[in-house]
Image (tube, grey):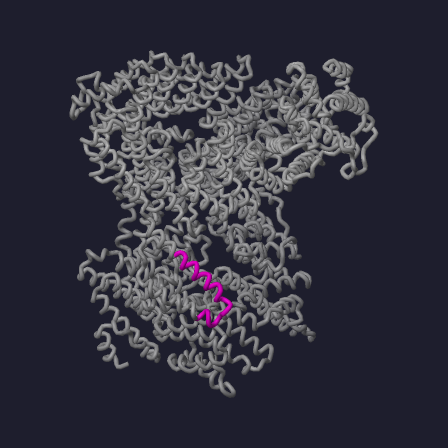
């Protein structure tokens, strides 16, 4: 038979396999068919009949079996020529046809059927492994090359398993045989391989030969095992790619575990473990089935362990244990359902109670089950599992009871988890006891439930469920309280075990239970770990009583003596050491007395006591007995026990026998066992770590003797010691407990030496700031680097990094370490090389200076480059690359470039392995430098591009083309494409190529141009500005000529033309290098001047003055370029540093003459540099500023002095010396020239560096600030408040606030002293109102504070003109008006000076430039010209700004956005959701609609400045809209009207709550529209007047007199205004508190529409009430026909002070008529609060919210106000939770939050809430300040600022004092000062009840807060006086009903005073 097989195989022409791999499609198909036919013949002839095969296997020799030879042959073909089995596996496109797929499928099924049949034949066991391997290989081929085929085949496998399970469950009739009807195919003859592709092969009825016969149950299970193992091999694919089959697979596996025999169960469990490992879980119903199967398997294991063969039982247990381990992982990742976990826990508890855990003989299964229990403990099932606590306690009781018996290990984990959880729960209960009033809350809750049940029966079910949950939680808590006694149980068990041992020892029995001793150790370890775990949460817990510790020490000693005479000495003694180790685990937490510690030391010293009678400083008790015990025990102790004893000794506190411990270490050094000797170094480290001071000499002396030990174990220990020694000796180390405790070793051995400075490998340089160790301490370890053992060398390198963290190295020492590392980098062992590559990066960090560090880095990189080039092995090159990467992660800026270039060279020129390693390291370098890859390239792009060009040029003849190199670079650094890379970096690549000027460079240039789809000419022209500057600074004369000639030849353009194409940028780029290449830049400028045909100046550039004159016309462009360089984010820091240095050099070159005119522009550029704080940038900024002040004329510096000082103040923190030098130059050296400006420098700090400056300032300003009157000081501050620079304004406002606060008395006299208020006060108020429109939130906040300090001065006292004459002059009928041109240029100059950045300044410069050109404004000698006349109208400082802009050449860049794409209306859209955005976008959208050419040009020029200067936009907006309306189409007009109406409608719809919402957006946008409409209305009036005048003039000459109203322009504007409804304007104005305007529009509405006044009297009444015009209110009431409506009656009664009547009658009637209208309830609440009845208001609103909880939002504010007016702080806290304190939502809410913060003495929160609330008041004020009469209109908000100031001052004065230390006299004085100031300020306010009563109410609330704080009668008396003041106000203004009697706590003094008033 063997010969037949051999003949069949040899008949195959083996050349046919070449056709399979290399043939054409037809040849390949023919070859595949031929090989398949051979396989078919072999299998069908020799393997198809399994019974015959079995007989042949019994006869034949094992080595010569033909069947095995056939299988090997087929396996060989499968491994090398997989295409034979999977058609198309070598060509993915070959499986496109259905025929090919069917052939492969049929052949695969045929082959699998035969292999499965053989693998499942019991008598063919010798073939099983080969068949199994072949099946796996075949499926692997299908998986790799055709997933659909694999899916079909694996599905057939799972279906076959299901069929086999059914077969196993059936009992066939006698004589019948079961068939497995799977793997069916239509291959029955050879012909069918090529001719038969069945139409429906799955549905055909093949003969019996196609089915597998199942002969018996054993045969069936063997087939199941084969197929199940096959599924297990592809478990990953099943989980991730065949999810539709997973549910069936889980079901089959569980069924086999349940029904199968032990072998099948084991195989199924193995597959289950694999599925769990890959993250698969059975569906929820199957989870419980799986659980029952697993637990049944465990029960079976426990029952059959003693009946089965050991190997079978162990194998089954191991498989089951693996499943349980995977379940633990699934629990940890929270993948299992809670019901499954609950069932699992219950079943485990049941089996523990039945003691089944201890019936398990296999350690792995026992450990897995315990780990499962521990995992469930940690999962904390208490919230999910009702009986969890009870069952856990039952488990714990069983576990505790098992302690002291057999199989007691691993119980510690469960006990520790439970004890810690219980103790933590108890601590939480203790720390957080039930709150007072809980019973009341419960009663309220029950009452609430009853009410809900009555009103809402549908909610009853939810409430019942909630109640049941609460009852369950309550019962659960009670259950915990009853069962939380595990700690006591453990202590009790420990005591019992100790008592049992004592009893046994006292009885002097020879044998002692080792299990009992072990149990004692188990419990000790449990308690000690609990103590360590709960050290912070339960700090005062008594874990072991003093009695227990004494008993334990005595017991351990007795046990030691007994071990010497009893049996099992070694085990007993090792357990005693284990117990000692447990105690030493928490020596820092438990206080042991010296005697006890000494006894522990004696016990641990027994191996050495008998050999040394001196005992050094160890104090032995019962010394003779201990010596005898030591002598008896020592022979039984092996090396492990002695090592344990040595480590235990070393962990004893430092004061316990230090000499003896050192002596024991010396004895151990001579021990015969390497294990003992290896422990010495670790023990030494422990001793040193525990001692406060240690001699370095002692340490090195002990370790030096070990260095000669050749034991590998000792050398490994020494290497570890070397690393930790630096940590210990530098006092940075500590003994730390592990995060996860393992109980398989002594507890104390898990204490490890840790060092915080060594943990973070990227932060080693921080560690070096505090080290002082010398490398000489570690010299003795360096021979380990040459150890023959690779493992030792690896350990040495690994721990060398710790040494580097704690030493300071000189350059010579660094060289020594570097030589060692370089040797190890070339180590033959890969592990050593890899470790060394990581460690070497830390060596430079140890340098003693920055220079040393850099030198070390440079030397290392040089040596690495040498190694890389000399290396003849790829693995060494890879190691060098890895080392470079490690260095790069921590490298300095200087070395980072070298690392990057080295890695880049490896990527471009290395082989595949080295390239891959270099790419990985490049990413690691970027990660270490904390940048992304593209940012890393950007930091180094200039030098990197130079390197790339050199490399491409040098390697151009190699195989790799230049573009291939660039593509690699592009991919490495993360550019999207090569085109993007080239586009962004051409400016760096092309200059280098131009310098090469070679044919190779030309070829590279051509390839780059082609890749960018452009020509070389265009490429050179567009980048010549970079090429020219690079060539100038880098080439000598001959190279420059050659390179320029090359550029001309390649571009076919002359040099002059190339230069002139972008002349300005040539200068810009060249001047960028003037600081580094001064001479060459001069030469380049000379060359540029030669090519400048328009330059007529002197060409002798040896003079710097001539060069400055040449550059002057281009200076603004140069500065703009430098701005861009500093602002561009893609520029790295070094490029920005170069820019700043060159700017400094340019200022020096240009001098006073040329810098002074552009000083504002230069200063803006210098301000950009201040934002960079890295490296030396601040120092360079100081040098640049110093040069700036030297380069500006002193006369021009004077007005800028304050601004310069303010800008430089932040630099004082970093560069105090350099800033002081600048200030010294300005103030000390030039005090004569600048003295008049010193008064504005009051904000310079008084620091030592500025002592001279302060002296000079005092000389010039001290007298002024001391002697000047208050008015003069205010005027001085107002100068700063109106300054263009926001920083100066902020300092001026700060000064003004302090001045006003300190001079309140003077201020009050100025206001009240005369009938006419001082003009300074009016100027002050006007200036502050203007400041309300500040764009800076900080400045605006300070304006609010200043207004608050001023107080709410009665508007009647102030001389504020309603119509500002200055504003009158700013109105212009047309832009053609010269006055308009002058005003516009002045406004643009203001914007230029106020610009906070260079972009804003550039935009204003462009606008000025175009405006000057448009109006022809310039400085000419002929002043008769229009331009000259206009020029002379500007102030001198404006002319200085305009001068350089007359001839400037600013160009507007193309806009990136289109106004046409913006959605209309813009208001509140995405483009208009803030005021600034809305104004800017609306103006920008209207400008293109302007048809007038001049106007369009002007507005377009100014458009860019709108984005940076809102005031400029608001100035031009009326003119823009005017011209749009005049010239645009109806559609555009409709858009404008819609925009206006969108704003007005939003304001019109505002409800009552929104009306008081201080939104900047709503107020400002509405007021902006009012200003625009006023402008148009005024223009209409003037136009009409002008036309009438012309008509009158024309009428004298002609009878034809045109109608003035027929003027087209007038008609157009009038029609537009008519489109805006007057009633909408009136209502909008009313909602914005513009009541006068509202009345105006209302009257216009009635007049224009001829409306019946009776229909609108209600609204008219509201306006008059808001204006506080009682006469007009009465007039309205008089003209009402019939009974007035309720709302009109309410308003009338409120106006005349009849508040009480209103609240009792009108409101009730209104509420009865409309009970569901919230506004009536809000009005009633306001009335109650005005009546000073907050208690009634609070009760009313609380009841109302109970009935209507949905009104919470509308009534919340009234609740809060009532609470703080009542001083009900608890209620206030419940209404204002801390989570809502982030921002205010209204006045009353904000006051409440401030009062709460004050009550808690939280000053930071008080300040925060004050700032928020103050900022809310500034919105309406900023809108009001935009028109005349702003003070009166915004008076309500000024009153609020007044109140906020008083609240702030009172909180600081009254509540800042500690209540325990305050004296009555001090309190009385403070209180008197506060109240006196209140009274004085109150007298300044408007004399009305509406104004003064809120202020007095707040006074009372503050005093009530102070009363709660101090509990003083002084406060109570003052509180009564405030009620008196309220009564006076109420009586005076006929509102006595509003001053109700206070509650009973008011003192009698108030009643007497109140009575005397006669109210």
Q: Position of residue 1080 (x, y in %)?
A: 53, 24
Residue at left offset 27%, top offset 33%: 583
Q: Is residue 714 left or right of residue 947?
A: left
Residue at left offset 38%, top offset 35%: 410
Q: Tell me the quarter of the image containing the C terminus.
A: bottom left
Q: Tell me the quarter of the image containing the N terminus.
A: top right
Residue 453 drawn in magenta: yes
Q: Is residue 144 left or right of residue 684?
A: right
Please name whichever residue, 232 or 1381, is drawn nearer the observer in this view of the structure: 232
> Magenta segment, principal secondary structure?
helix
Within the image, what quadrant is residue 1232 found in?
top left
Within the image, what quadrant is residue 1644 found in?
bottom right
Residue 1718 seen in the figure: yes
Q: Is residue 1808 above or below residue 250?
A: below
Please name whichever residue, 1486 or 24, is drawn nearer the observer in this view of the structure: 24
Magenta segment boundaries in residue numbering: 451-473
Please name whichever residue, 1710 or 1918, is drawn nearer the observer in this view of the structure: 1710
Q: Position of residue 1857 (x, y in %)?
A: 24, 56
């Amino acid at each position: 038979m063997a010969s037949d097989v051999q003949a069949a195989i040899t008949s195959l022409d083996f050349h046919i396999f070449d056709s399979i791999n290399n043939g054409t499609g037809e040849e390949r198909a023919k070859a595949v068919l031929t090989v398949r036919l051979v396989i078919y013949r072999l299998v069908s002839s020799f393997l198809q009949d399994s019974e015959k095969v079995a007989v042949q296997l019994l006869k034949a020799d094992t080595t010569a079996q033909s069947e095995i030879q056939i299988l090997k042959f087929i396996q060989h073909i499968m491994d090398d020529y997989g295409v034979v089995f999977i058609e198309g596996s070598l060509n993915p496109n070959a499986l496109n046809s259905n025929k090919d797929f069917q052939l492969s499928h049929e052949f695969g099924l045929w082959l699998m059927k035969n292999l499965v049949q053989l693998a499942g034949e019991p008598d063919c066991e010798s073939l099983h492994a080969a068949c199994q391997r072949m099946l796996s290989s075949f499926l692997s081929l299908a998986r790799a090359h055709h997933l659909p085929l694999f899916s079909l085949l694996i599905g057939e496998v799972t279906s076959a398993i299901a069929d086999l399970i059914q077969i196993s469950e059936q009992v066939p009739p006698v004589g019948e045989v079961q068939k497995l009807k799977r793997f069916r195919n239509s291959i029955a003859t050879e012909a069918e391989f090529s001719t038969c592709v069945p139409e429906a092969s799955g549905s055909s009825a093949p003969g019996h030969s196609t089915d597998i016969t199942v002969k018996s149950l054993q045969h069936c299970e063997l087939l199941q095992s084969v197929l199940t193992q096959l599924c297990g091999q592809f478990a990953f694919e099943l989980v991730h790619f065949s999810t539709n089959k997973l549910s069936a697979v889980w079901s089959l596996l569980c069924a086999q575990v349940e029904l199968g025999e032990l072998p099948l169960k084991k195989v199924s469990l193995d597959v289950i473990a694999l599925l769990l490992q890959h993250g698969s879980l059975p569906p929820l119903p199957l989870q419980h089935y799986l659980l029952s199967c697993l637990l049944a398997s465990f029960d079976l294991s426990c029952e059959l362990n003693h009946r089965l063969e050991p190997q079978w039982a162990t194998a089954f247990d191991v498989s089951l244990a693996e499943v349980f381990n995977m379940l633990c992982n699934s629990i940890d990742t929270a993948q299992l359902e809670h019901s499954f976990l609950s069932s699992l826990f219950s079943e485990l508890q049941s089996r523990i109670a039945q003691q089944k855990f201890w019936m398990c003989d296999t350690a792995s299964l026992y450990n897995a089950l315990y780990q499962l229990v521990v995992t469930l403990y940690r999962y904390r099932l208490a919230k999910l599992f009702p009986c969890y606590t009870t069952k856990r306690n039952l488990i714990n009781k069983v576990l505790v009871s098992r302690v002291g018996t057999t199989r007691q290990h691993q119980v510690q984990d469960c006990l520790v988890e439970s004890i810690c959880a219980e103790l933590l729960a108890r601590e939480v209960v203790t720390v957080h006891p039930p709150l007072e009033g809980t019973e009341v809350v419960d009663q309220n809750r029950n009452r609430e439930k009853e009410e809900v049940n009555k009103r809402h029966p549908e909610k009853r079910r939810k409430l019942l469920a909630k109640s049941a949950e609460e009852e369950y939680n309550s019962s659960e808590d009670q259950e915990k309280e009853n069962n939380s006694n595990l700690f006591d149980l453990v202590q009790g068990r420990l005591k019992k075990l100790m008592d049992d041992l004592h009893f046994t020892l006292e009885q002097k029995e020879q044998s002692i239970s080792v299990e009992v001793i072990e149990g004692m150790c188990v419990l000790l370890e449990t308690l000690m770990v609990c103590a360590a775990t709960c050290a912070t949460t339960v700090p005062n817990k008594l874990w072991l009583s003093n009695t227990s510790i004494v008993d334990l020490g005595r017991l351990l000693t007795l046990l030691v003596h007994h071990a010497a005479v009893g049996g099992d000495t070694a085990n007993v003694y090792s357990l005693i050491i284990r117990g000692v180790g447990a105690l030493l685990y928490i020596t820092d937490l438990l206080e042991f007395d010296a005697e006890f510690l000494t006894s522990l030391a004696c016990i641990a010293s027994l191996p050495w006591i008998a050999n040394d009678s001196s005992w050094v400083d160890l104090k032995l008790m019962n010394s003779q007995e201990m010596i005898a015990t030591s002598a008896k025990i020592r022979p039984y102790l092996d090396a492990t026990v002695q090592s344990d004893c040595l480590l235990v000794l070393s962990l004893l506190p430092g004061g316990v026998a230090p000499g003896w411990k050192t002596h024991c270490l010396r004895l151990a050094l001579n021990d015969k066992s390497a294990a003992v000797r290896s422990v010495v170094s670790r023990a030494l480290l422990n001793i040193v770590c525990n001692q406060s001071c240690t001699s370095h000499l002692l340490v090195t002396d002990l370790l030096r003797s070990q260095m000669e030990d050749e034991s590998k174990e000792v050398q490994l220990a020494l290497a570890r010691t070397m690393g930790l020694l630096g940590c210990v000796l530098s006092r940075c180390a500590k003994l730390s407990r592990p995060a996860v405790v393992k109980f398989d070793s002594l507890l104390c051995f898990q204490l490890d030496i840790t060092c915080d400075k060594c943990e973070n490998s990227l932060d080693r340089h921080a560690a070096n700031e505090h080290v002082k160790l010398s490398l000489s301490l570690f010299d003795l370890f360096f021979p380990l680097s040459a150890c023959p053992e690779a493992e030792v060398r690896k350990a040495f390198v690994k721990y060398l990094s710790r040494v580097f963290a704690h030493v300071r190295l000189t350059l010579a020492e660094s060289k020594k370490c570097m030589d060692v590392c370089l040797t190890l980098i070339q180590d033959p062992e890969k592990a050593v090389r890899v470790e060394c590559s990581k460690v070497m990066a830390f060596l430079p960090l140890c340098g003693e200076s920055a220079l040393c560090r850099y030198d070390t880095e440079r030397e290392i990189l040089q040596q690495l480059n040498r190694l890389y080039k000399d290396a003849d092995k790829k693995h060494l090159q890879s190691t060098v690359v890895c080392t470079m990467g490690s260095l790069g992660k921590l490298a300095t800026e200087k070395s980072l470039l070298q690392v990057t270039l080295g890695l880049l060279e490896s990527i471009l020129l290395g082989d595949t392995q080295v390239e891959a390693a270099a790419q990985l390291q490049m990413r690691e370098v970027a990660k270490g430098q904390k940048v992304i890859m593209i940012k890393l390239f950007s930091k180094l792009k200039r030098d990197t591009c130079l390197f790339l060009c050199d490399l491409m040029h040098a390697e151009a003849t190699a195989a790799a083309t230049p573009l291939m190199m660039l593509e690699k670079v592009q991919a490495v650094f993360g550019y999207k494409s090569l085109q993007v890379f080239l586009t962004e970096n051409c400016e760096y690549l092309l200059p280098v190529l131009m310098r090469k000027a070679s044919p190779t460079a030309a070829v590279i240039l051509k390839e780059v141009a082609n890749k960018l789809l452009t020509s070389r000419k265009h490429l050179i022209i567009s980048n010549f500005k970079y090429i020219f500057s690079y060539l100038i600074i880098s080439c000598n004369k001959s190279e420059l000529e050659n390179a320029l000639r090359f550029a001309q030849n390649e571009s076919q353009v002359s040099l002059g033309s190339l230069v002139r194409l972008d002349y300005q940028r040539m200068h810009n780029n060249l001047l960028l290098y003037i600081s580094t290449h001064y001479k060459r830049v001069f030469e380049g400028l000379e060359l540029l001047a030669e090519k400048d045909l328009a330059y007529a100046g002197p060409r002798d550039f040896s003079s710097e003055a001539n060069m400055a004159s040449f550059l002057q016309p281009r200076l603004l462009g140069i500065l703009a370029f430098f701005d861009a360089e500093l602002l561009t984010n893609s520029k790295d820091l070094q490029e920005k540093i170069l820019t700043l240095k060159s700017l400094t050099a340019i200022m020096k070159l240009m001098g006073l003459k040329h810098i002074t005119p552009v000083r504002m522009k230069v200063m803006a550029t210098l301000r950009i540099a201040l934002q960079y704080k890295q490296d030396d940038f601040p120092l360079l900024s100081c040098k640049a500023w110093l040069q700036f002040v030297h380069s500006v004329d002193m006369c021009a510096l004077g007005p800028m002095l304050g601004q310069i000082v303010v800008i430089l103040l932040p630099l004082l923190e970093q560069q105090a010396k350099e800033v002081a030098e600048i200030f010294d130059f300005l103030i000390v050296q030039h005090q004569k020239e600048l003295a008049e400006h010193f008064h504005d420098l009051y904000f310079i700090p008084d620091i030592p560096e500025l002592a001279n400056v302060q002296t000079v300032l005092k000389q010039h300003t001290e007298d002024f600030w001391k002697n000047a009157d208050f008015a003069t000081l205010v005027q001085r501050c107002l100068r700063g408040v109106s300054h263009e620079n926001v920083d100066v304004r902020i300092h001026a406002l700060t000064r003004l606030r302090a001045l006003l606060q300190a001079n309140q008395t003077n201020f009050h006299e100025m206001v009240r002293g005369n009938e006419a208020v001082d003009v300074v006060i009016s100027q002050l108020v006007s200036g502050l109102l203007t400041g309300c429109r500040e764009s800076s939130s900080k400045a605006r906040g300070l304006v609010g504070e200043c207004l608050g300090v001023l107080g709410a001065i009665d508007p009647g006292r102030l001389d504020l003109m309603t119509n500002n004459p200055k504003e009158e002059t700013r109105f212009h009928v047309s832009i053609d008006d010269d006055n308009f041109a002058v005003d516009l240029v002045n406004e643009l100059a203001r914007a230029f000076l106020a610009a906070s950045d260079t972009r804003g300044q550039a935009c204003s410069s462009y606008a000025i430039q175009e405006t000057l050109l448009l109006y022809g404004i310039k400085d000419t000698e002929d002043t008769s010209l229009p331009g000259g006349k206009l020029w002379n109208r500007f102030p001198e400082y404006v002319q200085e700004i305009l001068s350089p802009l007359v001839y400037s050449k600013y160009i507007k860049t193309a806009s990136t956005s289109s106004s046409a794409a913006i959605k209309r209306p813009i208001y509140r859209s995405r483009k208009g959701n803030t005021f600034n955005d809305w104004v800017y976008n609306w103006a920008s959208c209207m400008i293109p609609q302007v048809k007038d050419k001049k106007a369009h040009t002007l507005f377009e020029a100014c458009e860019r400045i709108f984005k940076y200067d809102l005031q400029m936009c608001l100035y031009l907006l009326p003119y823009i809209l005017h011209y749009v309306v005049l010239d645009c189409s109806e559609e555009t007009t409709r858009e404008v009207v819609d925009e206006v109406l969108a704003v007005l409608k939003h304001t019109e719809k505002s409800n009552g709550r929104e009306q008081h919402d201080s939104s900047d957006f709503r107020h400002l946008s509405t007021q902006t529209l009012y200003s625009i409409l006023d402008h148009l209305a005024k223009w209409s009036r003037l136009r009409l007047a002008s036309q009438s005048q012309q008509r009158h003039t024309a009428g004298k000459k002609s009878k034809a007199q045109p109608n003035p109203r027929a003027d087209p322009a007038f008609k157009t504007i009038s029609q537009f205004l008519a489109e805006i409804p007057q009633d909408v304007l009136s209502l909008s104005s009313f909602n914005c508190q513009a009541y006068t305007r509202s009345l105006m529009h209302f009257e216009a509405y009635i007049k224009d529409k001829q409306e019946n006044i009776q229909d609108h009297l209600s609204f008219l009444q509201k306006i008059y009430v808001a204006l506080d015009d009682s006469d007009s209110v009465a007039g309205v009431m008089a003209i009402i026909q019939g009974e007035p409506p309720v709302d009109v009656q309410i308003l009338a009664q409120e106006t005349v002070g009849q508040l009480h009547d209103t609240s009792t009658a009108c409101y009730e009637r209104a509420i009865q008529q409309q009970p569901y209208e919230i506004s009536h309830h809000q009005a009633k609440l306001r009335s109650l609060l005005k009546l000073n009845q907050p208690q009634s208001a609070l009760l009313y609103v609380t009841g109302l919210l109970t009935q209507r909880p949905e009104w919470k939002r509308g009534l919340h504010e009234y609740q809060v106000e009532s609470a703080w007016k009542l001083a009900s702080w608890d209620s206030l806290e419940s209404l204002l939770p801390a989570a809502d304190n982030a921002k205010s939502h209204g006045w009353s809410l904000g006051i409440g939050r401030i009062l709460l913060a004050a009550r808690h003495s939280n000053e930071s929160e008080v300040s925060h809430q004050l700032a928020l609330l103050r900022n809310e008041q500034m919105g309406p004020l900023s809108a009001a300040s935009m028109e005349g009469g702003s003070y009166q209109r915004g008076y309500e908000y000024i009153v609020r600022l007044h109140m906020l100031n008083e609240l702030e001052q009172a909180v600081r004065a009254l509540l800042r004092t500690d209540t325990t230390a305050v004296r009555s006299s001090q309190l009385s004085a403070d209180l008197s000062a506060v109240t006196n100031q209140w009274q004085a300020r109150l007298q300044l306010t408007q004399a009305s009840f509406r104004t003064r009563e809120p202020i007095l109410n707040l006074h009372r609330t503050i005093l009530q807060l102070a009363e709660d704080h101090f509990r003083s009668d002084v406060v109570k008396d003052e509180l009564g006086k405030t009620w008196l003041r309220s009564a006076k106000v109420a009586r005076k203004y006929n509102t006595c009903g509003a001053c109700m009697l206070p509650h009973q706590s008011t003192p009698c003094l108030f009643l007497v005073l109140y009575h005397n008033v006669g109210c």
